Amino acid sequence: MFNIKCVVLSLTLFLSSCAGIVFDPEKVADTFSWNTEEGPSQLPDGVTLYECDAKETFYIKYLEDGKSLWITFLKRELKLSQLETNPLHFANGDTLLALEEENIYIKNADDVTYENCKEKKFD
């Protein structure tokens, strides 16, 4: 009986000590985010930052000798593959990235979610 009481007391104390731990997603995001304000030295090698209308941004990193790319948004990441019909278009079925010279844009289904995107140049 004494062992059961010790186990219950220990578990109660252990679990109550965990109640004070608070997960702050902003602190985690700050720790793992890329600081683009200080220039390209803060970006990982081979990563390009794009800025679009409405202050939207995303990053791309080419993979497999340019046959696919990894695109990173604020809250998600996707792998897109180059389309055989147009080497400037990358898609995964739902999302299309068009690297047109005049207008770089991203479409989800039929909706354009990012448009008039330009590569961010650092001085």
Image: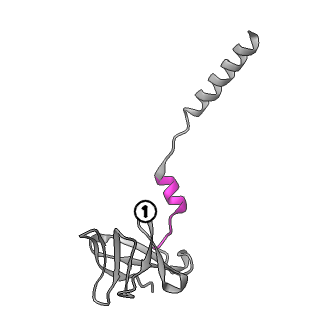
Residue 47 position in % (x across, y down): 50, 78
Span colored in magenta: 26-36
Q: Quadrant of the N terminus?
A: top right
Q: Quadrant of the C terminus?
A: bottom left
- Give the residue furthest to the front: 84
Q: Residue at x 69, y 23 (%)?
A: 10
Residue 8 position in % (x across, y down): 66, 18
Between residues 61 and 29, which one lies in front from this camera angle?
61
Three-letter amino acid code of the residue under disc 1 = Arg
Q: Which residue is mark 1?
A: 76
For disc 1, the neighbor class at 10 Å (few under 14, some 14 to 19, many from 20) is few
Between residues 65 and 122, which one lies in front from this camera angle?
65
Magenta part, dominant SS: helix
- Give the residue furthest to the right: 3
Q: Residue at x 65, y 24 (%)?
A: 11
Could you tell me how many numbered marks the image carries?
1
- In the displayed structure, does residue 28 sit left or right of residue 94? right
- In the displayed structure, does residue 12 sit left or right of residue 59? right
In the image, residue 59 above or below residue 5: below
Q: Is 119 part of what is drawn in magenta? A: no
Between residues 11 and 122, which one lies in front from this camera angle?
11
- In the displayed structure, does residue 57 sit left or right of residue 3? left
- In the displayed structure, does residue 115 sit left or right of residue 20? left
Residue 64 position in % (x across, y down): 54, 82
In the image, residue 33 above or below residue 25: below
Q: Quadrant of residue 12?
A: top right
Residue 122 position in % (x across, y down): 45, 84
Q: Is 28 part of what is drawn in magenta? A: yes
Q: Residue at x 34, y 68 (%)?
A: 94
Q: Quadrant of residue 5?
A: top right
